Amino acid sequence: MMEDSYVETKVEALKDNRVKVTVTVDAKDIDVRIKKTYKDFAHKYNFPGFRAGKAPRPIIDNALGAEAVVATVTDDVVNETYPRAIDGANVYPIGKPAFGDDMGLVEGGKPFVYTLEVDVKPELELSSYEPVAIEMPVDGATDAEIDEQIEGLREHYFDYEDAAAATKIKEDSYMDMSMKATDDSGEEIAAMTADSRLYGMGTGLFPATFDAELMGMKKGQTKSFAIDVPAEPTIMTQPLMGKTAKINFDVEVKAVKNKVLPEVTEEWVKDTMGFEGVEDLRTRVADSIKEQKAEVLPRIKENQCLAVLADRLEGDVPESLCEEAETNLLQDFFQQLQRQGASFDAYLAQQGITPDQFKDDVKAQAKDMTRQDMALDAWARHFKMDVSDQDVVDEFEKSGAPEPKKLQEEWTKNGQLHMVRNGIARTNAAKDVMDTAVVTELKPGEAVKKEEKKPAKKAAAKKATKKDETAEDAAEKKPAKKPAAKKAAKKDEAVEADKAADAE
């Protein structure tokens, strides 16, 4: 591409977030392009009576048509200049540009002027630019949190003891029972038949209808009953799908069991846990909580801040941006599945959701992400967080690309620097929002209060994501006409939030 191919770019605002861009390409550049194209054609095609590269312009025009060269130059100059023209117009395009119907062909000795119209990202505003107020789990490790973690450790080392003979089976009971299971034909089902089986109610090994039959039984009681093989199988009934409609049981309760947790003594901590003592255990648990919080709290803080900010956004976000975010989420999600060697069906089964539920969730996440991003745009504009040319250079320098300068030149050529600038501005805005946030620390065990949603036009932001992809992301991929602008939110952040809640 010629350096400084266009010498002037004018922008005119139209209705509905659409702009008209007028591009003027210098006459000298047009002349250089025409000369080069004639030379290229003279080498490319065979013209009788002339050696390769020596055919004069009239011969080329006569053989290929009078407009062949200028039409080629027109296509080349438009395709090469319009991305940079849009980029240089300081707008963020969404969708493809529409070129003016009156576009002519280039002429030697004259500047070439053409126009295009393109939809641009709207500049929505926030209802307030005051610091956001959020609630966060307390930093560090409190005694209550340490106690809760140790209680969880005790749960892993429980034992059972027989309850009193008159104890009845309840929803959370454990029992020792003998059981015989047969199918419709009276054939014994070996996997379900045992002289002694320790079973816990509500564990999901058997259907809820099985547990319901055991409710209220006591030691020494027997019972015969039948249950249907459920449409949604459990671990124990899965192998019977399609083989029998019912399962017949004969059970005897040998004992109702109480779960007994170990006492946290110096001896138990040393012998079972391998620590020097109770104090050492508490110190190790505290360190683990601190390490866990140091990892997840910054992300949770970002999530909280962006959610509040997105709720302040006034107006509707463009559907095209939501669709782009959805496409990027899906692309990143399936790439991750592929790297893990997992299937989509296995993922759905693990999450316990249907394809339609997955699709709806991704669509909702995409809209939330788009609202958060546009809220950050508003914050950056309001506080005049301008991005300098040096900021862009620095972004490419820290991208990790082998040749950052060359990478920047490619992005410049493709008219993609607006994405880098936008990403930098959003990152700076997010940092400012988090730095100025008014944080209320929650007490251990206290849940984050859900903001009461007004019947408004805006959707609640669910998860935070990375800002627009900048040069750092670009180092891992070739610059394209439309590089991916997001990282998928996926389930990881929800897991992190759960971890922090557990850490409380």
Image (tube, rainbow, N blue to C red):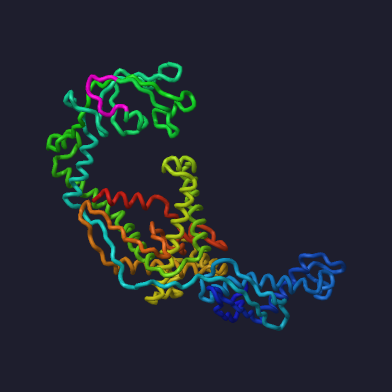
Q: Residue 163 placed where, x, y %?
A: 18, 26
Q: Residue 271 placed where, x, y %?
A: 17, 33
Q: Residue at x 32, y 57 (%)?
A: 300
Q: Residue 117 placed where, x, y %?
A: 60, 74
Q: Which residue is nearer to you in this view: 184 or 473?
A: 184
Q: Quadrant of residue 150?
A: top left
Above or below: residue 474 compared with residue 163: below
Q: Which residue is nearer to you in this view: 180 or 469?
A: 180
Of all residues shown, which one is farthest toward the left? 266
Q: Quadrant of residue 47?
A: bottom right
Magenta stretch secondary structure, dominant? loop
Q: Residue 84 placed where, x, y %?
A: 57, 72
Above or below: residue 120 compared with residue 480: below
Looking at the image, residue 256 sits to the left or right of residue 429; the answer is left
Magenta stretch?
A: 213-222
Of all residues shown, which one is farthest toward the right? 49
